[in-house]
Image (tube, rainbow, N blue to C red):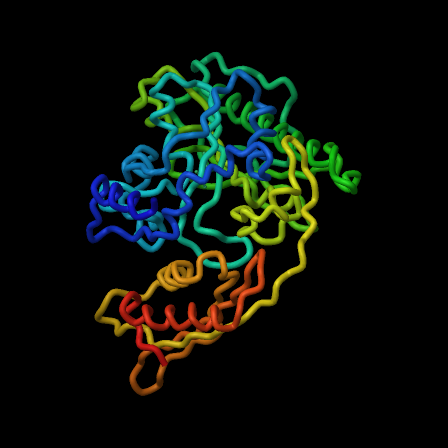
Amino acid sequence: LVGRLNVCRCRLYPPDAQTNVTRSILSRVGRGLHQQPAHPLGIMAGFIREYFGARYAYHDAISPIVSPAANFESLCFPADHPGRSRSDSYYLNRDWMLRTHTSAHQAELIRGGNDRFLLTADVYRRDEIDRTHYPVFHQVEGVCLFPQHAVEAPSTPATAASPANACDTNPRQPCYRREDSMAVEEHLKASLEGMVRHLFARAASHSVDGAAHTSSEVQMRWVDAYFPFTSPSYELEVWYNEQWMEILGCGVINHSILERAGRPDAIGWAFGIGLERLAMALFRIPDIRLFWSEDARFLGQFSPAKVTHFRPFSPYPSCTKDISFWLPPATTAPFHPNDLFELVRDMAGDLVEDVKLVDQFVHPKTGRESHCYRIMYRSMDRNVTNEEINDIQARVREHAPKRLQVELR
Ligand code: PHE
């Protein structure tokens, strides 16, 4: 089947110089973890949907393959934004990519006549490798529009600490009346604070030691943020495990987006929340790879609409291997660590737990730079043999010179 899919894909999305998507990434497309009612990600999405209620249309099956125009241009990203680079995003070819965020669908959904909606989906970003980073994760996007001059007041006001409202670096949009923008900001903050209280309350009502964070005790604060597609923009942080944890980005939608989507009369807010980090906290899931486990010892622990703490099955031993190499000479394409991470993922799949730069120096005579990375291998659900790891490591070494233009040491 994978072979056949590959053939179809090559016909629909012929590879070119921009292509950097790998087979292991494509194998994640269509898994639909967020659509499974008894999966922690599905449970989280369900709580958010439950909180916003029937006035918000719900979408959870939009294809992750989008145009760079949808992912970036429709959202006012500048042409030189780093997120567009091949080292940060996955491209099928020049014209098609895997969405890096659910905001990629804002414009088309607004144009389609949705003025209140939620969209839950898988998103794809090239990133480092450790227990909290995975190249595929899930977000819920929320959008709420009002006619200008008729912004609703929230049923309960926002109460979390906020930065001094809309300053020079985080301005209101001059095309809106000040009171309209302020009313949208208030509706946004009140709605999202309510959503977080709801999530923590749902978690507390089932967990054994739920008393530790009952709904009234969630501490939140707003901080100024920047997104090319909202202004003013904010992030919401939650006090969790003795530190502030950033859980969502949001803001007042740029009016140009609404105009282009056929809603020049409107004003509104948008937010995007990542599901994994919050689910790891509420379900006490220690490694992000576990969300992809098909092991009944993982999946069997959860049931719809309930937050239960994950009971780890015995951790399997890890195995560590180093790889050292000279970076390509300055005259060729620069080395990007994400390319190494991708190569390791490609060879090891979910057997890689962590990749860290452990040593780095410049040769005093030749001026060449050397990196040493420590790769930690471990399976979440079985014992792996030494030979298996040696084999993977050998394949990483075999492919590194060609794919990364490095010279092994
Ligand atoms: N798309 C942003 C992200 O992935 C989050 C966001 C959504 C911010 C909507 C503002 C409005 O980081």
Residue at the image position 61 percent from the left and 67 percent from the top? 317
Q: Toward which corner of the image does residue 37 lie, by quadrant?
A: top right
Location of residue 42 in the rendering, given as x and y in whole percent from the top left corner: 56, 34
Q: Is residue 355 above or below residue 27?
A: below
Number of numbered markers: 0
Report the residue at 55% width, 60% height from top: 379
Left or right: residue 386 compared with residue 1: right
User: Looking at the rendering, which quadrant does residue 405 occupy?
Assistant: bottom left
Point out the image quarter for the N terminus: top left
**Looking at the image, which residue sits at the far bottom?**
365
Compared with residue 26, is residue 358 higher up or lower down, i.e. above or below?
below
* 264 or 210, nearer to the observer: 210
Between residues 71 and 91, which one lies in front from this camera angle?
Answer: 91
The image shows residue 297 at horizontal and vertical percentages of 63, 48
Identify whether 351 is placed above or below 193: below
Q: Nearer the viewer, residue 354 or 384?
A: 384
Residue 103, percent from left and from top: 40, 34
Farthest residue, direction front: 1
Residue 166 makes an appearance in the image = no
Tell which quarter ligand 1 is in.
top left
In the drawing, does residue 323 fall left or right of residue 295? left
Give the image location of residue 359, x and y in percent: 46, 76
Quarter of the figure with the C terminus: bottom left
Whether residue 336 is visible to the viewer of this picture, yes or no, is: yes
At horizontal 35% and vertical 85% (from top left) the residue drawn is 364
